[in-house]
Amino acid sequence: MVIQATNKAVAEVKRLLEKRAAEGKVAQGLRIGIRGGGCTGFSYLFEWADDAPRSTDKVFEFSEGVRIFVDPKSLVYLNGTELDFVTSMMGYGFKFQNPNTKGSCGCGESVQF
């Protein structure tokens, strides 16, 4: 099982980690996952992991020391996902390119598997 991240996503995570460190908030990595809820059944979890990874987490390591933690249940839904960082006229942010989804809601905040 694998999670990928584009160079843009890795660079943005690194930038945000450095910003947090400058504010005295050190994170061990980024935690992504799936949780129940949202318009279509599931929503993505995206939060800083202030503690070391849990013993059951799968840890994906990228350049410049960027690490992404995923719990085993979420990994089933996220396998093959690519995390990207996009910039457009409508704004900017992280985007999950997940081949396992069957649909999403109109607002883009929740997904269906």
Image (cartoon, rainbow, N blue to C red):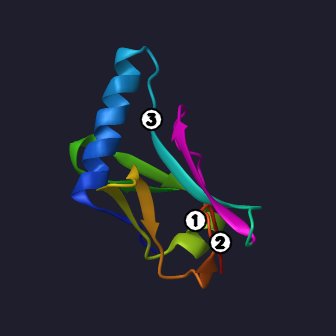
**Residue at the image position 61 percent from the left and 63 percent from the top:** 107
Classify mark 1: helix, strand or loop: loop
Indicate yes or no whether the magenta region holds residue 85.
no
Foreground of the two, 75 or 9: 9
Which quadrant of the view contains residue 44?
bottom right
Res. 108 mark:
1
Task: Check whether the beta carbons of the residues at disc 1 and disc 3 lie within 8 A of each other.
Answer: no
Please state which of the two labelled residues, at mark 1 or mark 3, is closer to the viewer.
Answer: 1
Q: Position of residue 96 (x, y in %)?
A: 46, 65
Figure check: 95 above or below 23: below
Q: Tell me the magenta residue range.
A: 41-57
Circle 2 is placed at which residue position? 105
| First in residue order: circle 1 vs circle 3 | 3
Query: In the picture provided, is 7 more to the left or to the right than 71?
Result: left
- Indicate the quadrant containing the C terminus: top left, top right, bottom left or bottom right: bottom right
Choose the circle earlier in sequence order: 3 or 2. Answer: 3
Considering only vertical position in the picture, is 16 above or below 95? above
Picture disc at residue 28: 3
User: x and y percent of residue 84 in the render?
Assistant: 35, 60
